[in-house]
Amino acid sequence: MRHLMSPLDFTVEELDQLMDLAADIEKHPSKYAHACEGKKLATLFYEPSTRTRLSHEAAMLNLGGQVLGFSSADSSSAAKGESVADTIRMISCYADICAIRHPKEGAPMVAAMHSSIPVINAGDGGHQHPTQTLTDLLTIRSLKGHLDHLTIGICGDLKFGRTVHSLINALVRYPGIRFLLISPEELRLPGYVREDFLEKNRIPYEEVVSLDEAIPKLDLLYMTRVQKERFFNEEDYVRMKDFYILDREKMQAAPKDMLVLHPLPRVNEISVEVDDDPRAVYFRQVQYGVYIRMALILTLLEVQVC
Ligand code: CP
């Protein structure tokens, strides 16, 4: 039985197969419409979510399966003190696969250790968000045509943004990748991500503060929001929250084929006037998130579709 805790749980070859499957689902959705009939997905969300929970649910429904779950810790027996380990033992009796989001780093791993069904990490604290990374990789591969030889700007909250940590972790395995890490001093990438993912793999990177200086050099710009929920005090958040705002003027300095991605939700960091720019692909990214999660569910449940 296989779980998904980190994007590195799949080899580069397995990721290619997963993305090929997602591309086939995009082209031939009806072929997969009954693939998971009789199967159930449980979504255990101890933290708020729109995309990750609903896209997992949409993915299972598109495959002909059914869904159950909870969308906040308060509406589950976690509010009475039940542990993740005990909860997953129950869920293993009710469902065939589950996706769990939790504010504590490592909670999905604890669930996986006590589970008799595949567990998907749907985001754990500021640590990892592997299904967002699968979504990002599929978006880049589909719209750029390749995942190698790219200069990628990652902008915003690089300290707390788990999507950033997962994406860097995954992309360092492709040749010719370099990063421009664009953030205020206070929100720089954590030391362990820099050392374990970038420096150990000898990946070229630069830490810069100015988005204006970085933008002309980029193949991709991955914008992120400042993670309000991970700040210890409101004052620091207010000081940081509008540090970067990508607007039409800034986009004028960007290469004609630079793509703008964002895991969403967006707050102020991308002005709505950018939404109509053909290089802004963050809403298309959301659709790719459904295809890749369909492919992931089929793969973890070992369902073959001929
Ligand atoms: N991208 C993402 O994780 O969005 P949600 O928090 O809405 O799931």
Image: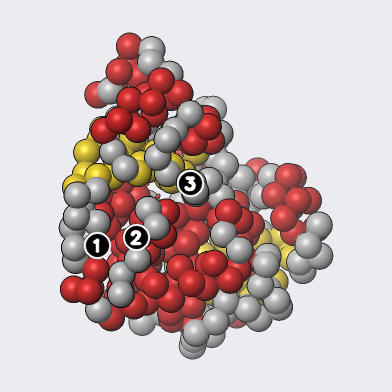
Residue 54, compared with residue 294, is above or below; it is: above
Q: Nearer the viewer, residue 58 or 279?
A: 58
Report if residue 186 is visible in the image.
yes
**Amino acid beneath label 2:** Val
- In terms of image quadrants, where is residue 273? bottom left
Q: Residues within 10 Å of mark 3 (few under 14, many from 20)?
A: few
Q: Secondary structure at mark 2?
A: loop
Residue type at mark 3?
A: Met
Residue at 54%, 67% (x, y): give it.
14
- What residue is shown with label 1? 35
Q: Is mark 1 within 8 Å of ligand 1?
A: no
Q: Position of residue 134 (x, y in %)?
A: 47, 62
Q: Quarter of the image containing the C terminus?
A: bottom left
Identify the image quadrant of residue 200: bottom right
Give me the disc on residue 303.
2
Asked if residue 62 is positioned above or below residue 124 in the image, the reply reads: below
Which one is earlier in the sequence, the residue at label 2 or at label 3? 3
Circle 1/circle 3 CB separation < 8 Å: no
**Left or right: 219, with 224 as reference point:** right
Circle 3 sits in a helix, a strand or a loop, which is it? loop
> Are the residues flagged by discs 1 and 2 in contact, CB closer than 8 Å?
yes
Q: Secondary structure at mark 1?
A: loop
Residue type (three-letter) at the residue carrying disc 1:
Ala
Q: Earlier in the sequence, mark 1 or mark 2?
A: 1
Q: CA distance from mark 2 to mark 3?
A: 13 Å
Q: CA distance from mark 1 to mark 2?
A: 7 Å
Residue 257 numbered tag: none
Q: Residue at x 70, y 49 (%)?
A: 193
Residue matched to label 3: 1
- Give the Cα distance between marks 1 and 3: 19 Å
Mark 1 vs mark 3: which is more N-terminal?
3
